[in-house]
Amino acid sequence: MTPLRLGISPCPNDTYIFFALLRHFQDQLPVEVHFHDIEELNQLALEGAYDAVKISCALLDSVSAEYGLLRSGGALGRGCGPLLVSAGAKALFPGARVLSPGRHTTAQRLFQRYCPLSVNLEYRLFSDIMEALAAGKADFGILIHESRFTYQEHGLSLVQDLGVWWEETTGAPIPLGGIVLRRSCDPALASQLETLIRQSIAYARNHRAEVLDFCRQYAQEIDDAVMGSHIELYVNQYSHDIGPDGIRAIAYLLFGDHTAEPNFLWSQT
């Protein structure tokens, strides 16, 4: 059987979710995994590089003809949104230099919804943003992933929690990312992959020490407390099944209407 070509990020929530699928379930579904930064994954999805790939929810409307969203394996939730931070400035101002983790990221989409001002956006690898801000190379930065737990150690201050802003504005959970699968794949494969992802999450919960050893190999922040906080925040009920609330949240992010037809799903059932 030809292995499924899978692209995911090296962030702890992804490596935690997919550990058992990659290490223990290969006899059920052979998988060839590739690790990339989230914005690289977004670009690779636009190029159709993988059979299944983790992408930002903000990109779903751009790849929905080629890929559909699976109901498991994603990153949605509450209290887990991107952070707008600075090394000193208290509020955004016209012409400010803002570092973003990527043009296609949900963080970028949320910032554009939040900020009415004309600013100068610059794109950086997410893990380089804090250092650049601390060095005075920009006025503001949008932080994602583990950075939300460590920015204060770099002398940075919170300007706006974009996730809190989203939740207060919409009442919906924050739709960060999800796993998409080629629409040309067999429906049986889509169902099998969703099931194995759920089983992989269950395995991780029951074999935490083993899984954390794997996560530690890839994490940007290797402090166990930070890594554990990251996993607890981003691996939740929506990772198991996106559910109606998650679907409505994505529809609102993409179309500004939570009742919009969810044509981004791989299967409507």
Image (cartoon, rainbow, N blue to C red):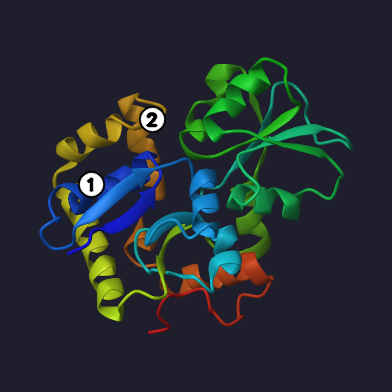
Check disc 1 and report its element: helix, strand or loop. helix
Using residue 149 as the reference point, say whether residue 192 is left or right of it.
Answer: left
Q: Which one is in front, 47 or 21?
A: 47
Q: Is residue 66 above or below residue 108?
A: below
**Percent x, y for residue 7?**
38, 51
**Percent x, y for residue 135?**
67, 15
| Residue 235 visible in the picture | no
Q: Residue at x 55, y 47 (%)?
A: 81
* Badge 2 amino acid: Val
Q: Residue at x 34, y 64 (%)?
A: 72
| Residue at image mark 2 | 226
Check disc 2 and report its element: helix, strand or loop. helix
Residue 91, by quadrant, is top right
| Residue at image mark 1 | 19
Residue 242, by quadrant, is bottom left
> In this view, which residue lies farthest toward the top?
135
**Percent x, y for residue 121?**
76, 39
> In this view, which residue lies farthest toward the front?
2
**Percent x, y for residue 26?**
15, 55
C-alpha gap between disc 1 and disc 2: 19 Å
* Badge 1 amino acid: Phe
Q: Is residue 149 above or below residue 20?
A: above
Q: Residues within 10 Å of mark 1 (few under 14, many from 20)?
A: many
Mark carried by residue 115: none
